[in-house]
Amino acid sequence: MMQRFKGLIKLKQARNGLLSYQRNFSALPYDAQYDDPQDQVLVEGRAKSRAAILNRPASHNALTIPMVARLKRLYESWEENHDIGFVLMKGSGKAFCSGSDVVSLCELLNEGKMEECKTYFQTLYKFVYLQATYLKPNVAILDGFTMGSGAGIAVPGMFRVATNKTVFAHPEAQIGFHPDAGASFYLSRLPGYLGEYLALTGDKLNGVEMIACGLASHYALHERLDLIEERLGKLITDEATVIETSLAQYGDLVYPDKTSVLYKIETIDKCFSHDTVEEIVNALENEAANSYNEWCKNAIGKIKEASPLSLKVTLHSIREGRFQSLDQCLAREYRMSLTGMSKQVSNDFCEGVRARLVDKDFAPKWDPPSLEEVSKDMVDSYFSPLGELEPELELPTALREPYI
């Protein structure tokens, strides 16, 4: 089994050319002391680099409209500045980024401010694409919660440093949404059917597991981050190999322990390779009955907590992502997000946010309430073109080459 994970690490290294060079969501109140967008994203100047610091620590750095707009402006200006060789992004407090501030998004929807929600997703997805096609080396320090779109703004970048404090997850289906911000691209490219498992159950990975499956490029202890940042801050370079060497100097060679979900990869492939959510649940139930496997029961429980509609939409999204480039995934996810926000098919997004993050009764009233009642037309509507009056997401693919 250890040989298999050494193989996974080799696979990760081979795939870095695709992934790198190519929402535990916050329910905490809005950080009133960080109303100014410049306070929500701080900037540190170094000798030949710049650092963007996500700065809403009380909300685990959950992303807002001003934050993603400022990040996009900063990264665009830094890319054009010949005095800047590379850039870095990190979070303040105990999180890198817990995802989108979904409570605020639902408040906007309930106030009839759909246009502001559209602006948020447009800006977020354009920033993800900018990160993925960035012309200069870029580093993300994934220390603490790295969830939902918080992972989306980092995973497509060149260097992703995970730590012993990292917690990665995509729990969107559990709040009636779908993994977005490029998640259908990178989750679909994980070994086997691990991406489907993570997307449907919302299960977590730690920093070691992120290295093993290719989501992170480097691993370092939290206690060494100050040394890493000090070293990077002194570099006078725009060479990716120099930055790579500096990161590796403080890195650790690690392997998942025996309790890791990655040791369940054969069972994951056996169960999550099926074409429908119903078949996946049946496979897990059969596996649990035949092997008395507690892990299977836990996976079933997590799936059954999620929105039935979101589960089917999410599975379809990951499967389409396997055959699409990043820009195609982002354009499709934008359609999906707007459909979910519009409430034309279901109000599951705001209902899930209410149940899990606002009232915290953990008793969402999903609509439809069961997988059997989710029709093909409902799912298909999330993937249909937006229509003549609603512009599609436009990305600068002619200027910035997308990944295959």
Image: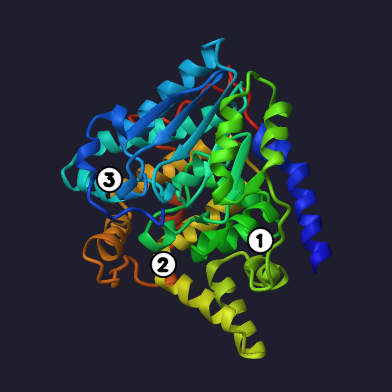
Which quadrant is home to the C terminus? Answer: top right
Q: Are marks 3 and 2 in contact (CB under 8 Å)?
A: no
Q: Position of residue 222 (x, y in %)?
A: 54, 50
Residue 85 vs residue 110, the one in the foreground: 85
Q: Give the numbered dot on residue 92.
A: none
Question: Helix or strand or loop: what does disc 1 sit on?
Answer: loop
Image quadrant in which you'd find residue 18? top right
Give how far across and how far down residue 248 sits, in percent: 71, 40
The x and y percentages for residue 261 are 63, 68
Residue shown at the point (27%, 56%) measured from the top left: 350
Q: Which mark is residue 306?
A: 2
N-term mark: 1 or 3: 3
**Which mark, by number, is residue 105?**
3
Q: Amino acid at mark 3?
A: Leu
Residue 211, compared with residue 53, is above or below; it is below
Q: Mark 1 packing: few (<14 Cα in 10 Å), some, or many (20+)?
A: many
What is the three-letter code of the residue carrying label 2? Ala
What whole-number distance in Å separates the C-alpha atoms at marks 3 and 2? Answer: 19 Å
| Foreground residue among 348 and 229 | 229
Q: Which residue is identified by label 1?
A: 193
In space, the residues marked 1 and 3 are separated at their CA atoms by: 31 Å
Q: CA distance from mark 1 to mark 2?
A: 19 Å
Q: Are marks 1 and 2 in contact (CB under 8 Å)?
A: no
In the image: residue 25, left or right of residue 249: left
Q: Is residue 273 above or below residue 77?
A: below
Residue at far right of view: 3
